[in-house]
Image (cartoon, helix red, strand yellow):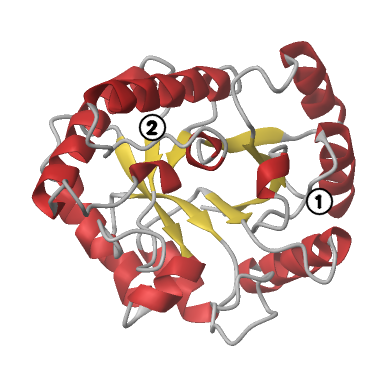
Amino acid sequence: MSFKSAITVSLVEEARGGPFVYWDGMQDACEKASALGFDAIEIFAPGPDAVDEAELKGLLEKHDLVVAAVGTGAGMVKHGLSLTNPDADHRAKARDFVKQMIDFGGVYNAPAIIGSMQGKWGGDVSRDQALAYLREALNELGPYAAQHNVPLFYEPLNRYETNLLRTVAEGVEFCKTLDNDNIKLLADLFHMNIEEADLAAAIREGKGYVGHIHFVDSNRQAAGMGHMDHAPIIAALKDIGYDGYLCAEAFALPDSDTAARNTIEAFKRLTA
């Protein structure tokens, strides 16, 4: 069993300054990630047509990289779409956007991630109703992703970003209510640091459900740049048999190159 390293690249100009390491295009990201020894990139794109397929396949081959996952957050950030919006037409558009991103990632055997597009409850939408909308979406989108032989990742977020599901345990319980088993949880250490009493215990509770890790520190900088103790988390991941990616969804602080280098050094140190 071995962990794999990944790093984020954002192509969404509206999100500049957000928690992504590389910002200057696919070629720049692939060259730099490969030079540092990363196994994969995670792509945050404005839409399914933002990347030329032949160009990206060429870059991946040249630099011995794969795509670990693709984000759908631009659906919210750029297009204002939410899977729990009270309007049925809006929700349908949101599901269609996610399907397009599932298809985009599927070309590279990369799962899509549902994070900010899950939305919130409030106003005309009760918590139960919002969760029903989310369940409806995941019951449709999980099997859709399965057509590409990949799971769909659902990410519990911290209380400042959603009021739906915030912990791994809540995510597990929700997954048990779905009528498909193709939804896996994305456990983001930054969100977990806010919501979980014990990150390692939460990982163990997620056995069988955790499919992807966002590998960062307490301040959402590169691992090692905050006050998080990663050793027990890595031990817990080993205990549950996790063999997926540890992906840096981190701020490019003090700059992209330093954040990337700090990440790969922490990855090697912790997983040795």
Query: Residue drawn 29% across and 49% down?
Result: 209
Decide: marks 2, 1 in contact (CB < 8 A)?
no
> How far across and down, in percent of the image, does residue 157 sit?
39, 60
Q: Determine if residue 115 is in view.
A: no
Query: Residue drawn 54% across and 58% down?
Result: 214
Residue on which disc 2 sits = 151
The answer to whether 22 appears left or right of 76 in the picture is right
> How far across and down, in percent of the image, does residue 57 sit?
75, 19
The answer to whether 114 appears left or right of 173 in the picture is right
Q: Tell which residue pokes out farthest to the bottom in this image.
A: 227
Residue on which disc 1 sits = 37
Q: Decide which of 247, 139 is in the foreground and name it.
A: 139
CA–CA distance in space, label 2 to label 1: 26 Å
Query: Residue drawn 57% across and 63% down?
Result: 215
Tell me if residue 249 comes above or below residue 23 in the rendering.
below
Q: Decide which of 165, 82 is in the foreground and name it.
A: 82
Classify mark 2: residues with Cα within 10 Å, few (<14), some (14-19) or many (20+): many
Tag 2, which secondary structure?
loop
Of circles 2 and 1, which is in front?
2
Tell me if residue 164 comes above or below residue 152 in the rendering.
below
